[in-house]
Amino acid sequence: MSEVVTYNREGAIGVITVNYPPVNALGHAVRSGLVAALEQGQNDADAKALLLVCEGRTFIAGADIREFGKPMQEPGLTSVIDQYENSDKPIVAAIHGTALGGGLETALGCHYRVALSSAKVGLPEVKLGLLPGAGGTQRLPRLTGARKALEMITSGEFVNAKDALGLGIVDAVEDGSDIKAVGLAYAQKVADEGKPVRRVRDVTDKVEAEKGGEVFDQFRAGLEKKARGLFSPFKCVDAVEAAFNLPFDEGMKRERELFMECMDSPQRGGLIHSFFAEREVSKVKGLSKDTPVRDVNSVGIIGAGTMGGGIAMNFANVGIPVTIVEVKQDALDKGLGIIRKNYENSAKKGRITQQQVEERMALISGSLTYDDFRDVDLVIEAVFENMAIKKEIFGKLDEVCKPGAILASNTSTLDIDEIASATKRPEDVVGMHFFSPANVMKLLENVRGSETSDEVKATVMAVAKKIKKVGVLVGNCHGFVGNRMLHKRGAEAMALVNEGASPQQVDKVLTDLGYPMGQFAMSDLAGIDVGYRIREERRNAGEDVAPSWMDKLVEMNRLGQKTQAGVYKYEEGSRKPIPDPEVDQLIAEFRKEQGITPREISDQEILERCMYVMINEGAKILEEGIADRSLDIDVVWIYGYGFPAYRGGPMFWADQVGLDTILNTVRNFHDTLGGQQWKPAALLEKLVSENKKFGDL
């Protein structure tokens, strides 16, 4: 008998208990133990029903990630589930915490399911580029019907216990915290009432009712937009459809075939890398797990604009009160009004209740004086990119804020150490770079200054988790990690247009790679004036920043989506970029002024120049220690800039392309185009010479 799965009888109920911390994952020992315990239960003449229950904080939460990439040892999960489903004694699965992936598939192999009201269930395999491979695509739709099964399986999202009850996934939901007591009571009821063995595979009413319907084609059409470029969601649809077109055993074979197709897809490697990278990034190099974390129970924000308001919502959403300071009452009122409008829109879409709107708005207060920051634990400055203004603000904060308060800047490019120099407490100053829209985007790029204390670093990483962001701690330089690489790509995209490409050609190459939008559409979304101010700041600092046709767009008040015209034009209420002949004419005039004869540029050249310049810069960022690991860069780009997760992030993608290929092309561009951006990074050259990858660092 496996020590992680035990069998004992309590009255007439045979209890199979899994105890495999931390999440009772379906490792080999658990699978073997489940089979052995079931055999004991079957042979126990005094057991009238069996109960499957887990110790610890959760039911089986999926596969054992320690076995990822290794050959599956027998018994496989499908075999285990088949044996449970074919038991001649009724089996009750008692669910608490989360029943995910193979955990939910195991529960579906049992004959009855009871859950605590706090439990959640789901099949998240699609997030790893896979599909449920142990019967999930065949059993779930027999209970829920096609559409809800498709929604759950193609999104990988969880369903709470109450909704699971309504969908027929579980048979009963109980309040309380003692899952074993709940499970025993339900199993006793099954035994007392002589309830029969009820196999999900034999439930056919919904299958028969929806057979031959249009739901599958409709769902695929919807995925064309939502899951553009992804492989596994469409295979999930194929697998669920098999449940409606084939007998159960043949459907299981089809599921296995489709599962293996997903296993063979290169997207699986990228998504698994993204999955592990997101978890690994919270472990900061050189920062002890025992580092004290300061309490953050109140927050101040400077600036009620789009960014400041979005940041405020993150804290109100998790119950942390926020004070927003503005210079003028009308700006403050406008900002608070936009926050309310955002919440009201969420309520209209059913994402939150009207009561939650009022609760969250009650946590956000406005002020015209910094004095109201005297007692807050964290202040985040969110004004536009101007060093003089930021230093003036931090000087005031230094005077007003209590000792131990963290002073953070939302700057996207500027030197954190210079900002900190305006205070007498540089150890408490840090960058917290939110991404727009701040209440939606998951990335929080936390920037350590040279004197930022470990305590502050640990605290801002904990804050990221608290407000449901993916926090990445990076070093201090112009643009940090994300924007430093973006600026290189942006400059190359501009150069390509200057030389003869169109903005829409450049954008199409990037969206074909998997980005949600291209360089120029992204500029329009962020506001072209943002980049303009950054260029002006650099010019004021004495840098030689070349003139740009984008500057002319700003001077024409074409600022992007917010003015319905930027590089593209936009119809009222639409975010769809429309090419504009007026911009084509402006670019043609700019080329003429600069003495440039346009040439035809291939999509391949655009791909190489936009992407390889980023990889070369990423290598320099690693060399300098601005990022500790290549996965830090990958996470920044996936969650901050929409780099396709199925490609694993830019540095992982580069490893797949081949660093020797990239280095040779970078050298060629250095020879033909010149410029520091094309000088090969020493780290890139070193890795190629040693036949290594970024992933080996």
Image (cartoon, rainbow, N blue to C red):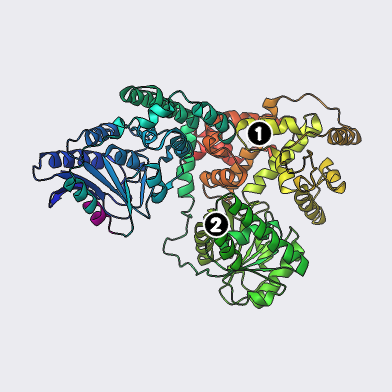
In this rendering, the answer to whether 211 lies above or below 225 is above
Report the side of 554 relative to 122 (left or right): right
Question: Which stretch appears magenta?
Answer: 178-184
- Residue 252, image x, y percentages: 34, 26
Q: Is residue 444 above or below residue 166?
A: below
Mark toward the start of the polypeptide (2 vs 1): 2
| Relative to 126, residue 328 above or below | below
Number of callouts in the render?
A: 2
Q: Is residue 282 left or right of residue 661?
A: left
Q: Quadrant of residue 314?
A: bottom right
Horizontal arrangement in the rendering, residue 475 relative to residue 277 (left or right): right
Q: How far across and how far down the image is residue 34, in percent? A: 22, 41
The structure residue drawn at horizontal position 65% and vertical position 54%, both measured from the top left corner, is 477
Regarding residue 74, the answer to whether it shows in the image is: no
Q: Residues within 10 Å of mark 1 (few under 14, many from 20)?
A: many
Identify the residue position indicated by label 1 in the image.
510
Determine whether the residue tagged by mark 2 lies in a helix, strand or loop: loop
Provide the residue designation for mark 2: 353
Q: Secondary structure at mark 1?
A: helix
